Image (tube, coloured by chain):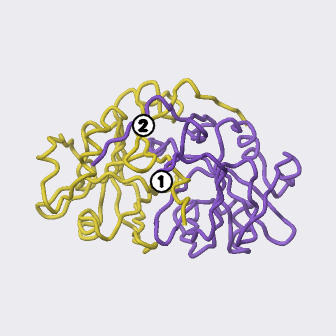
Chain colours: A yellow, B purple
Amino acid sequence: MAGFYQFYPNVVTLIGSRHGDKTNLMPAVWQTGVSKNPMVYVVSISQKRFTHGLIKASGVFSANFVDFKYVKTIARLGSCSGRDIDKIKEFGVELGQHKQLDVPIVKFAYASFECSVQEIIPSGDHDLFVGRIASVHEAGGIKDGSETIDCNAVRPLLYLGKDTYITVDTGSIVTIRR
Amino acid sequence: MAGFYQFYPNVVTLIGSRHGDKTNLMPAVWQTGVSKNPMVYVVSISQKRFTHGLIKASGVFSANFVDFKYVKTIARLGSCSGRDIDKIKEFGVELGQHKQLDVPIVKFAYASFECSVQEIIPSGDHDLFVGRIASVHEAGGIKDGSETIDCNAVRPLLYLGKDTYITVDTGSIVTIRR
C-alpha cells in the first residue's frame, strides 16, 4: 500500500552511538520529542543497523540537529555502515565534549540531546528507542529568546523521502496567539 | 532545563477521534511514522486531553495532514477543547468517508491515516499511542510519482513552538543519490 511517507517532511537527526572502541553516526528521520517534563525523545531504528546494536549495548545515544548546509555530509553519512568504516574518521567529523552521558556530540550540530534508553519497543520493521534526555547542547544564537529556534540563524534539515531534502521558508513564519 | 524544543520544526497533524456520539479533532506535533512494513505511526498525547480518553475508549484514531494555508483553522482547533464544544460544528469542518476504521477523515487534508491502537506507552507527561496504519487517504496530485510529497502542490504545515508556524522552501529541494 502506498502513502506511508505522507507524514514527511521530518527533521533529520544524526544519531550518535558509542560502545567499546566503536563510535558511530547515523542519520535518522523517524523521531520526535514526546514529553516535556521529564524530557523524553524517541527514535525508530532498524534492527539491521549497526547503530541499533551499539545503543542496545551501551544504553545511551545522542541526537544531533544540523543545518541544511550540511546536507551532503549527512547524505554521505547515511550511505555507508559503521560496520565497514569508521565514519567519524572517514568524513572528518569533529566531536565535542559530552556532559553527562558517554555519547558522541557532533560539533557542527546546532543542538544535541544526550539520551539514556528507558525502553526499547518493537514496532514493525524497526525498534522504537525511548530516550530520557539527560542533557541538551545548543550553539549560541540559535534561539530567538522565546524557546523557538530562530530559523533566520539556522535552517533545520528536513527529509522528504527518496534521498530528497528540503528546508524551511523563513518568509512564511507566522505566530497565531490563542 | 531549556532546549527541549530543539527537535522542532515538526509537521502538525490533526488527530481525529470518535467514541459514542463524540467526534473530535486536535492538532498534534509530537508524532512520526516508525515502521514501513507493517506501517506504524506514533503520536504523543497528554492524559489531560479530551482526545486521549476518546482514543483510549475507541481504540482507533486518524492522523490528517494539512496545507499551510489552513494554519488559522488549525490554530483555532488547538485553542479549545472538545469537552466544551463540538469543534467539527463550531469550525464547519467537512468530514469525508472513512475506509476501514470508524474515524473522522478531514476533507481539506491532503492525506490521512486510519490507525488502530496497538499499544499505549506511558512516557513522562504524555502517553505514546502506537498506531497500526490500516488505510491511507491521499488527495490527487500531491505526490511527484516517486513516493515523495510534491511540495509545489502542497505545502506541509510545520510547527516551531510558541504558537509559531512555518512551511517549507520549495526552492531549497535537493536530491542526493547514494
Which is more toward the observer, B165 or A37?
B165
The chain carrying label 2 is A
Circles 2 and 1: CB distance less than 8 Å? no
Badge 1: residue crowd in 10 Å (few <14, some 14–19, many ≥20)? many
Q: How far across and down, in percent of the image, does residue B57 sit?
A: 73, 74
Name above or below for residue B21 compared with residue A168: below
Real-space Cα separation, disc 2 to disc 1, in angstroms: 14 Å
Numbered badge on residue B153: none
Q: Quadrant of residue A72?
A: top left
Residue A12 sits above or below residue A177 on the image = below
User: Is B69 in front, or is A96?
Assistant: B69
**Residue drawn 35% across the image and 39% down it:** A66
Residue named by callout 1: A32
**Number of residues whose C-alpha sits closer than 10 Å to that of mark 2, classed few (under 14), some (14–19) or many (20 or more):** many
Label 1's element? strand
In the rendered image, residue A178, in percent from the top left (x then y), is placed at 73, 37
**Most extreme residue toward the front, as rendered?**
B145
Q: At 73% across and 74% down in the image, what residue appears?
A: B58
Name the residue that disc number 2 marks: A156
